[in-house]
Amino acid sequence: MKYQCPICKQTLLLQAKTWCCPSNHRFDCAKEGYVNLLPVQNKGSKDPGDNKDMMFARREFLNKGHYQGLSDRINELASCYGKAAKTGLDIGCGEGYYSHRLQASLSALGEFTLQGLDISKSALKYASKRYKDIDFCVASAFEMPFADDSFDFMLRIYAPSQDDELRRVVKKEGILITASAGEHHHFALKQLIYADPKLHMTGSSEIPQFELLHRENLTSVMCLQDETDIGHFLNMTPYSWKLTDEQKSTLVTEGLTCELDFKIEVFKAI
Ligand SMILES: C[S@@+](CC[C@H](N)C(=O)[O-])C[C@H]1O[C@@H](n2cnc3c(N)ncnc32)[C@H](O)[C@@H]1O
Ligand SMILES: [Zn+2]
């Protein structure tokens, strides 16, 4: 992947293990392999992105395969709508669970290289140590270090983004697949917490300069019995701190049954 300098926007070239632009702005590759292209002034906080506990819980939970159904469905849609893609970007890729499964799936159809981007350095430390066939950079989805029209395909799972910036880096007719919470997602947890739980408000399916090609809800019921899995699941959701210790220990001992409802959308850049 060719990166763009986050300071002056010129193309970065790799010299030994340092990305440099003609104005001599320099960005070293970390020993794990990722490059940090997030200017200090754009960091917002000392350690931006998800906190370590949430990230650890999500990593352990995903690696057990509990959300593999979502990954498989995304890969099916990617193979259908993005089968000719040669370059891809996973925005807010976290620790790369979905990225590496997508890379395996699309590269089986032909030449395909994937770039992962996340604002969290600790997530990318893990991802780049583990998934050597994917390039990773620390950067913000709101100001991505890529030239215009860089990608044939983009994935965004539960991560923030900015409409113009999405459209800027994708090629015309490029494909964007997004996944976010559907109305009934994790409803069983909400029922434990709120007297009058509300269905999740899902956002609009419109992104300027993109055409919606497909939309679906992937629903299932997840039953967890293993104590560790239940603990990780609770910690990776935003609800963990709203449950009492008593509610948590009941869930851990009695098991947890919970709706999964993923809203998946496929867009084409116009
Ligand atoms: C809920 S997690 C989803 C991670 C991954 N896509 C997955 O589903 O496993 C959201 C991710 O977005 C990242 N993130 C948050 N704000 C971001 C930003 N402004 N730019 C890039 N990534 C961001 C977080 O660090 C985190 O890894
Ligand atoms: Zn520069």
Image (cartoon, helix red, strand yellow):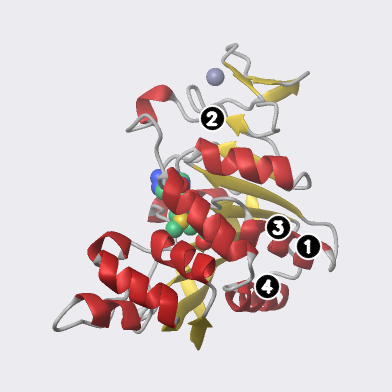
Residue at numbered disc 1: 104
Q: Could you say whether the residue bearing mark 2 is in a helix, strand or loop?
A: loop
Q: Residues within 10 Å of mark 1 (few under 14, many from 20)?
A: some
Q: Position of residue 100 (x, y in %)?
A: 70, 57
Beta carbon of the mark 2 residue lies under 8 A of ligand 2: no
Q: Nearer the viewer, mark 4 or mark 3?
A: 3
Question: Label 2 is placed on what type of residue?
Answer: Leu
Outermost residue on the left side: it is 195
Q: Position of residue 133 (x, y in %)?
A: 78, 47
Residue 225 lies, with reference to residue 115, above or below; the image says: below
Residue at numbered disc 3: 100
Residue at numbered disc 4: 75
Q: Residue at x 58, y 58 (%)?
A: 60
Question: Label 4 is placed on what type of residue?
Answer: Asn
From mark 3 to mark 2, how far is it between C-alphas? 21 Å
From mark 1 to mark 4, how far is it between C-alphas? 9 Å
Q: Residue at x 51, y 84 (%)?
A: 223
Q: Nearer the viewer, residue 35 or 8?
A: 35
Q: Is residue 40 left or right of residue 138?
A: left
Outermost residue on the top side: it is 24
Residue 229 lies, with reference to residue 219, above or below; the image says: above
Residue at numbered disc 2: 37
- Label 1 close to label 2 by CB (< 8 Å): no
Q: Residue at x 48, y 62 (%)?
A: 232
